[in-house]
Amino acid sequence: MADDDLDLDSPPEEGDELTEVSGGFTKKKIILFIILPLLIFGGGGAAAYFTGLLDPILGVEKPCIEITDVDDARYDECQEELALTADGMESTAPGLYYEIPDIRVNLNSRGSKQKFLFLSVKLEVPDEQNLVLVEQYAPRVMDHFQTYLREIRIEDLQGSAGIYRLRRELLERVNAAAPDLKVRDVLFQEMLVQ
């Protein structure tokens, strides 16, 4: 078959296995050498981005509250930063304390054996006015605490970073339950995982 006789609009004859598109490339070559690598590299790049493997390259750092591994290079730096943040939040004047009723919840566990968390907490407020507000909002605060604590896994409570993260999360739940309430800190009186 001569080049002049090649008809690109007509379907290939039964004997022809490949159809030439232009410049000597066949459809199979285009798929194999252009489209397939684009799909592989695009999919691999997307997977690396969403799993966080590209974070160091892109300059994205995990917040200190999420770093729990002692082997992480930023662990010591984050512990110091978290301690400074905690010190900066506290006032020199002693506050008033409201004792939240004891909390007992089952943790989110994957095995057949249930794990339970027993927690005794006090909320520190700056003045009498906020103490009255805490008493009014106590049922709502307890609801937010219970809802959050039921989703915690036992791995989330390991180490001092896990306890600090729990304290921050409970403080956020108080602020969500009562936005006009000023709570300085959440103080753990007793914590037991069984």
Image: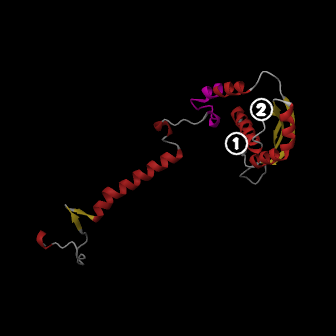
Using the numbered discs, state the Cα–Cα distance from disc 2 to disc 1 in whole angstroms: 23 Å
Q: Mark on residue 155?
A: 1
Specify the segment rendered in magenta. 64-80
Q: Is residue 52 above or below residue 33?
A: above
Callout 1 crowding tier (Cα within 10 Å): few <14, some 14–19, many ≥20: few
Give x and y (percent) for residue 100.
86, 40
Secondary structure under tag 1 reads: helix
User: Residue 17 location in percent, x, y?
Assistant: 25, 71
Quarter of image, res 131: top right
Q: Quadrant of residue 186?
A: top right
Res 147 seen here: yes
Left or right: 155 in relation to 56: right
Q: Is residue 108 on the magenta stretch? A: no
Q: How many marks?
A: 2
Q: Residue furthest top?
A: 92
Q: Amino acid at mark 2?
A: Asp
Residue for point 69% across, 33% down: 161
Question: Quick check: 70 left or right of 172?
Answer: left
Compared to residue 193, the image places residue 97 above or below, namely: above
Q: Position of residue 166 (x, y in %)?
A: 73, 38
Badges 2 and 1: C-beta atoms under 8 Å apart? no
Of circles 2 and 1, the one toward us is 2
Relative to 39, say whether 7 is above or below.
Answer: below
Q: Quadrant of the C terminus?
A: top right
Q: Residue at x 62, y 35 (%)?
A: 67
Along the line of sight, which residue is nearer the eye, 67 or 180? 180
Q: Nearer the viewer, residue 5 or 95?
A: 95
Residue at image mark 2: 185
